[in-house]
Image: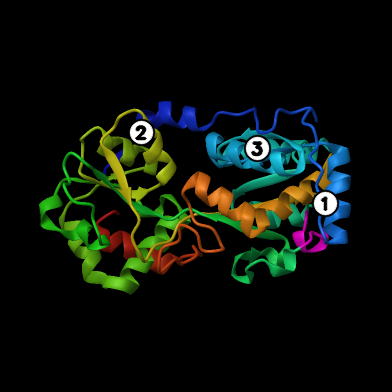
Amino acid sequence: MKIRNAALAAGLVAALAMTGCSGGGGGGGTAAPDVTVDDPALQELIDAATDEGEMTLYSIIDEGPMRAVAQAFTDKYGVDVSVQRLVSADLQQRYSAEAEAGATVADVVMLTHSPFYSDGFDKGWLTPLADADIPGFDEYPADFVRNDGGAAIVSLVPTRLVYNTDAVEDEPTSWEEYADPKYKGKLLFAAPDTSPANLTFWSLMIDEFGEDFLRDVAKNEPTWMNSAVVTTQGVAAGEGDLAHPGVLAIVNTLKKEGAPVEAALLGPTTGPEIGIALSAESPSPNAAKLFAHFLLSQEGSEVLAEETGDGSPFGLNMVDGWVSPGPVNDETKAKINELLGAN
């Protein structure tokens, strides 16, 4: 199996790892709007959050969309949000180090749902949403509540089919394009086991199209790489026609640079799910709860979906056939690698 070195992706990864941006100006300097609601519990929370005036968010979501969401929250409630955008590994490392030192900075954390959450609850770093008295939480779509009410999924990042618009005239309409003989030698794929979501995707393809589909993909001799960043960059540079998996944020970054690359949203699909959780030692606990209330409401959820282009648990930007990523056992993993010729 040929795996391309990740050095090619260094520039883009660095760009996606920018940190320290403020959504609402920081420092509690935003004039609080006069917010009055009918729900006494929500009104009490708004008043307490307004008194705190500011909060800090650690998030893996791209800087631009997350700042826009933070600004929408600030405009509504007058509470400033300092957004620290980090890649997942860095976020977990920083948050864990601060929590272990008893110096928690983040009031709210948002990253791909992973064992980090269960570990955080076990160690007492995170407060379960279900125990935080967040107004309206009991009305949140139950299919997207995790960790026995501890965390909730707020953004669904569907795997897409990436293609070079100079080489592919019409937008693909089916995952079966990967098996079309005309793409032999023109597929740039991340190895199946580069992420749990990627393994779930190929397991889903077996369920949808059968094992022969993966065998036909293998006949097209994909070039196996080690991340979606590298595969997408390769297609954008004309090194291949189709890439997998496709992540809209990566595609959009390259499009802004003028690259001839696009991402088709096809079903069925799966992909990473971004969760939200609250810090147990939050410096601004009421602002944190109010921010969670905003993102867990249909209004806030749709703002996030509109800014990122990713899916909302309330249905915006979703494609028919969404499947939440889950564990893939070793037997299925081995079968996927064998069928695709990726071992």
Secondary-structure class at tag 2: helix
Secondary-structure class at tag 1: loop
Q: Residue 71 carries which label?
A: 3
- Highlighted magenta segment, given as a residue range: 127-135
Between discs 1 and 2, the one toward the N terminus: 1
Occupied quadrant, residue 287: top right
Q: Does the magenta stretch include residue 161?
A: no
The percent position of residue 326, horizontal first and vertical second, equals 51, 65
Q: Which amino acid does label 1 sit on?
A: Thr
Gap between marks 3 and 1, in whole Å? 19 Å
Closer to us: mark 3 or mark 1?
A: 1
- Residue at the spot of label 2: 254
Between discs 3 and 1, the one toward the N terminus: 1
Q: What residue type is labelled 3?
A: Gln
- Residue at the spot of label 1: 36
Q: Residue at x 60, y 65 (%)?
A: 144
Q: Which amino acid does label 2 sit on?
A: Leu
Left or right side of 253 for 181: left
Occupied quadrant, residue 96: top right
Between discs 3 and 2, the one toward the N terminus: 3
Gap between marks 1 and 2, in whole Å? 43 Å
Relative to the observer, which residue lies in front, 29 or 243?
29
